[in-house]
């Protein structure tokens, strides 16, 4: 029998049982791809990470990210949480993780209670989808979708694309994912969606944003904190504003009873708009998986 230690942490929170839970295997050497996927499905969390030696010794580690059904090229809270778990490997407070989407830099918080990551790629803005499609997926009336600033728009910066949708306060509160509508959207828009759709609803709240994320087709009916949606949203809102840089706090997970705070920044640069996201982490469990 082979034994693999793991830890779990709650990410984008300062209290246990808030934020987004993450399982981390700090030494995944010896696990096959199929075993990693099976473990991620067994934990049944939004994501689970597996840490391997880096291909380039100048970097800290190669980090593989799996959700319940597939591997991901990049994700936000897995990098923040894995950076927190591997804090003793940091050099000058920085870790560098090799991932499918590119190199991810993780900067530890000065107090050691969290981390900030930079999205591995600049903002990419994709197609717009009809408001009725977004409304159906969210289970709300079309008039709850706001389009004065932008229509529902696909965007990404290294991870899976997210459909960014501004909604009314009632639309955000009442939303519930309709799996059949998600599947109809995939069938009707194969070129735009490429077989994947996750819905990131947001509304303005003072100087910040309240958000919810649904991806039921890939096994996440709702996510309490989504860093890889927060960074494209921050970049996209900067794109719309015309400003050179901005900071934005995003509150997510309230409706799930797991309130999360994601602190984002976005800045225009030579290669486009790049964004960061950070927040706190709290350790929860330690254990071993025996295979």
Image: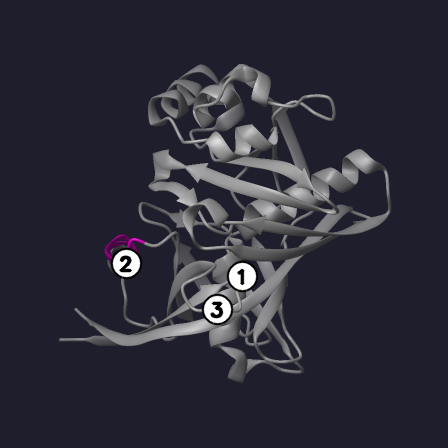
Find disc 1 in the rendering and name its residue: 12
Quadrant (top left/top right/bottom left/bottom right) for the C terminus:
bottom left
Task: Inspect the magenta stretch and tell me whether residue 92 lies in it.
Answer: no
According to the picture, the residue beneath numbered tag 2 turns out to be 43
Look at the image and name its color scheme.
Answer: one colour
Kindly report the distance in space between the C-alpha atoms of the residues bearing marks 3 and 2: 21 Å
Q: Is residue 225 left or right of residue 288?
A: right
Q: Is residue 54 left or right of residue 48?
A: right
Tell me which label, 3 or 2, sits earlier in the chain.
3
Magenta segment main secondary structure: helix
Residue 25: % across, % down: 35, 70
The earlier-in-sequence mark between 1 and 2 is 1
Q: Are the residues tagged 3 and 1 within 8 Å (C-beta)?
A: no
Which residue in the protein does label 3 denote? 15
Query: Taking the image as drawn, is residue 12 in sight?
Result: yes
Q: Give the magenta part as a residue range.
A: 37-44
Q: What SS does tag 2 mark?
A: helix
| Quadrant of res 5 | bottom left
75 to the left or right of 39: right
The secondary structure type at the circle numbered 1 is loop
Residue 176 coordinates in the image, percent (x, y) = 41, 31
């Amino acid at each position: 029998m082979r034994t693999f230690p793991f830890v779990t942490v709650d990410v984008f929170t300062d209290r246990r049982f808030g934020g987004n839970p993450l399982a981390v295997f700090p030494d995944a050497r010896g696990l096959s791809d199929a075993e990693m996927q099976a473990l991620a499905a067994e934990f049944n969390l939004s994501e689970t990470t597996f840490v391997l030696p880096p291909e380039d010794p100048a970097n800290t580690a190669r980090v593989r990210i799996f959700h319940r059904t597939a591997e991901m090229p990049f994700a936000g809270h897995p990098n923040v949480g894995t950076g927190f778990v591997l804090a003793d490997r940091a050099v000058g407070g920085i870790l560098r993780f090799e991932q499918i989407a590119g190199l991810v830099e993780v900067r530890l918080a000065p107090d050691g209670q969290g981390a900030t990551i930079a999205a591995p790629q600049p903002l990419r803005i994709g197609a717009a989808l009809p408001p009725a499609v977004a409304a159906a997926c969210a289970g709300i009336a079309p008039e709850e979708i706001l389009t004065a600033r932008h229509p529902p728009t696909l965007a990404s910066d290294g991870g899976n694309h997210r459909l960014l949708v501004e909604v009314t306060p009632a639309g955000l509160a009442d939303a519930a994912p309709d799996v059949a509508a998600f599947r109809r959207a995939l069938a009707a828009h194969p070129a735009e969606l490429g077989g994947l759709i996750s819905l990131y609803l947001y509304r303005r709240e003072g100087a910040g944003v309240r958000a919810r994320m649904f991806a039921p087709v890939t096994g996440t009916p709702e996510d309490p904190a989504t860093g890889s949606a927060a960074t494209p949203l921050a970049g996209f809102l900067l794109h719309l504003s015309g400003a050179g840089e901005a900071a934005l706090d995003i509150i997510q997970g309230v409706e799930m009873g797991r309130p999360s705070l994601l602190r984002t920044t976005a800045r225009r640069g030579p290669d486009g708009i790049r964004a960061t996201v950070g927040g706190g982490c709290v350790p929860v469990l330690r254990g071993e998986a025996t295979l």
